[in-house]
Image: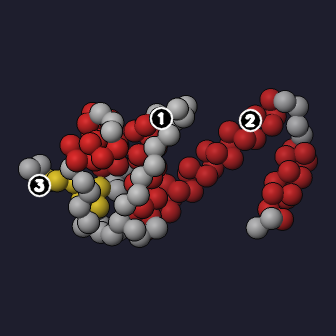
Amino acid sequence: MHIILNKSSMIPIYEQLVDQLKNEIINGSLAENDPLPSVRTLSGQLRISSLTVKKAYDRLEEEGFVVTVHGKGTYVAAADRSLALEARRKAVEDDFAAAVQKAAAVGFTKEDILEILNIILEDY
């Protein structure tokens, strides 16, 4: 597990941690029933507050990505690929929505936005 946090980012640390752990789970780097580091261990490794790690683990548990067994630790939940893919899809949709709102706010038309998207897609 390789986590890189940008402490100067506008995105809160716990959200960065949640996103990176989700990605590890979705792409299979963290498999079903794999243990996550303890809150204390991960906070020490990342040099962040244990409360931040706990908040990230709680969010992952709320979203169904991990299960916490009190006294034993936090583990990757049973693989539900559809849940994982839906979470990724929602994140991408949110990013697109934000980009479209920004473009509309500066006066771009629907056609302008589609043209930009087509140009970007040509690179893929």
- Tell me which corner region of the image, top left, top right, bottom left or bottom right, holds residue 2: bottom left
The amino acid type, in three-letter code, at marker 2 is Gln
Give the residue drawn at x 64%, y 45%: 95
Residue 7: numbered disc: 1
Q: Which mark is residue 101?
A: 2
- How is the rendered protein coloured? secondary structure
Q: Nearer the viewer, residue 106 or 7?
A: 7
Quadrant the C terminus occupies: bottom right
Nearer the observer: mark 3 or 1; the answer is 1
Residue toward you, 1 or 72: 1
In the figure, residue 65 lies in which quadrant? bottom left
Q: Secondary structure at mark 1?
A: loop
| Residue at image coords 80%, 65% | 123
- State the image quarter where residue 83 is shown: bottom left
First along the sequence among labels 1 and 2: 1
Q: Amino acid at mark 1?
A: Lys
Return the disc, 3 or 1, that comes first in the chain's sequence: 1
Residue at the left extreme of this rendering: 71
Give me the C-alpha separation between circle 3 and circle 2: 45 Å
Q: Earlier in the sequence, mark 3 or mark 2?
A: 3
For numbered disc 2, what is the local secondary structure? Answer: helix
Q: Which mark is residue 72?
A: 3
